[in-house]
Amino acid sequence: MLNTRKKLVKEKGAAPTELDQEVAKALFDIEVSPSCDIKADLKDVYISGAKDVEVKHGVAMVVHFPFRVWKTVKKIQGRLIRELEKKFTRKHVVLVANRTILDKNFRRKGLKVRPRSRTLTAVHESILEDLVGPTEIVGKRTRISVDGSKLMKVLLDPKDKDKENIESKLPAFAAVYKKLTNKEAQFMFPTA
């Protein structure tokens, strides 16, 4: 328990959940395992939380990282997802960075200019990039139906279709994106 505390940093006053502690312990176990090839990169990585999201055929686990360690996590994202999925069987693991959205009244917070990276649109785009992780987005289409509802179709790189079992994760990506942003998205590979 003492060692896993380094891998989990919550906001002041927030108590860690059982899932948070399990993920922190799994990260610590991956770091100290002798066969781990990402040991050096995991040394400075810690999480800020984790939660389960119900998916059509199972459960997806969303692991939140503070933005300051996201650059390191991004380098090892594919291998870290594989290691965490070994530890948590029957769960799709999705890694996401914590980002701050500043509203239009940002001057109350003492800022003169609102950075583009802190707008709602930019944060939702970044979450979309984080979700698909090891693969790449090659196209996006927004379909607006007659009743006014929007559906975003996200096209992923067809070269990554076979590797890392990404095709089975597509419903998990859609459910997690809906949970985090309250927007409908459909992930697919382009057809030839």
Image (cartoon, rainbow, N blue to C red):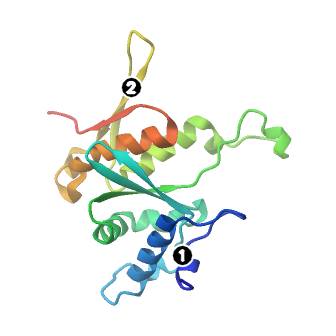
Residue at 53% in and 83% down: 1
Q: Tell me the kind of residue under disc 1.
A: Lys
Along the line of sight, the residue nearer the viewer: 61 or 130: 61
Q: Residue furthest top?
A: 146
Is residue 64 in view?
Answer: no
Task: Classify mark 1: residues with Cα within 10 Å, few (<14), some (14-19) or many (20+).
Answer: many
Residue placed under numbered mark 1 in the picture: 7
Q: Quadrant of the C terminus?
A: top left
Along the line of sight, the residue nearer the viewer: 187 or 58: 58
Residue at 52% in and 73% down: 45
Along the line of sight, the residue nearer the viewer: 42 or 173: 173
Is residue 46 in view?
Answer: yes
Q: What whole-number distance in Å separates the C-alpha atoms at marks 2 and 1? A: 37 Å
Q: Tell me the kind of residue under disc 2.
A: Leu
2 or 1: mark nearer the eye = 1
Residue 13: percent from left, percent from top: 72, 63
